[in-house]
Amino acid sequence: MKIKLAENFRAVFYAPFYATKALGLFGREGIEIELIDSASPGSGIADMLAGNIDVVWGGPLRVIKQRDQEADSQNALVAFCEVVGKDPFFLVGRTQDKKFQLSDLVGSKVGVVTEVPTPWLCLQQDLRDVGVAIDSLKVNAERTMAENLEALKTGTLDYAQYFEPFVSQTVSSGVGQVLHAANSRGPTAYTTFISTRKIIAQKKDLFEAMIRAVEQMGPWIDAHTGKELAELVAPFYPHVATDILIQSMDRYKAAGLWFCKRTISRVGFERLKLSMRQGGFISSDPSYANCIAEFSQEVS
């Protein structure tokens, strides 16, 4: 049976999705996955609601946002199967001897992620947690991550927020070092499968097969090196140099980024929602039970 799956965008931290496909684990569960490109991050959801695809992967942020804006219905989005359970973004800057603290950002020129909303919303909450006022930073929210890397090289920025492979590119080029890892805050629900209540009711058996396939990736990742993972998924990242891809996978593997499990962390969900609400991205308090598919809910 075929499932039409829209990938949010091609990102290194999505490696377990591609690895599951490369290892043939979906096929062993009796399903064929047709990967469909999204025109832009999040656009796959519109295609799904239009009936063109069955499921997307992406941030539960979009589920929470929809529930904040719209009443529950058969077309409501729900999340299931947590693959990325920690924040994959980092702060990088010029090499420094002293131990970095988030308070060091005060008065500094900081380039934040603009392509998607979650990273900056989460970083803002980290700053609030340590008593740093957001407006005390000189934030540039106009550049892309690639442009922030170039701005860091020229000294236009003091710090940049981005994910792999930009982090490893920064370190390898001698431009700077990793100063802060967002994964250090602990669980933050970051990437899951997302579908609608209606589609899940129709294709629950197929989605169960998807989950079984993905859950096999957790033990595989534990048993293999970052280099082996990089070699497996390299065809999906032809634009990333081999050494950089290996460094990226090593960094993410060491961070314990990938959960690859059926259930979605309640703690991680609440942390994401807190960042959204405190950041003004939502105004209500959507519940875990109303955003997460019943078969992917942790037992409270």
Image: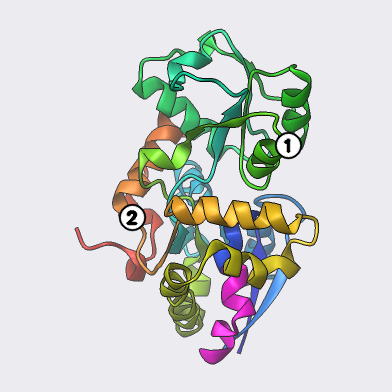
Q: Quick check: marks 2 and 1 in contact, CB under 8 Å?
A: no
User: Mark 1 sits on what residue?
Assistant: 173
- Residue 21 magenta-highlighted: yes
Report the number of numbered marks.
Answer: 2
Q: Which quadrant of the view contains residue 96?
A: top right
Q: What residue do we see at 67% from left, 47% from top?
A: 165
Type of the residue with mark 1:
Ser
Type of the residue with mark 2:
Ser
Residue 263 image offset from top left, x and y in percent: 35, 65
Q: Which quadrant of the view contains residue 10?
A: bottom right
User: Mark 2 sits on what residue?
Assistant: 265
Question: From this viewpoint, which residue is outermost toward the front?
Answer: 97
Viewer-closest of 173 and 6: 173
Residue 294 image offset from top left, x and y in percent: 33, 67
Residue 228 image offset from top left, x and y in percent: 59, 70
Viewer-closest of 37 and 256: 256
Helix, strand or loop for disc 2: loop
Q: What residue do we see at 53% from left, 73% from top?
A: 199
Q: Is residue 43 visible?
A: no
Part of the protein shown in magenta: 17-29
Overall secondary structure of the magenta stretch?
A: helix
Helix, strand or loop for disc 1: loop
Viewer-closest of 134 and 221: 221
User: Image check: 268 left or right of 95?
Assistant: left
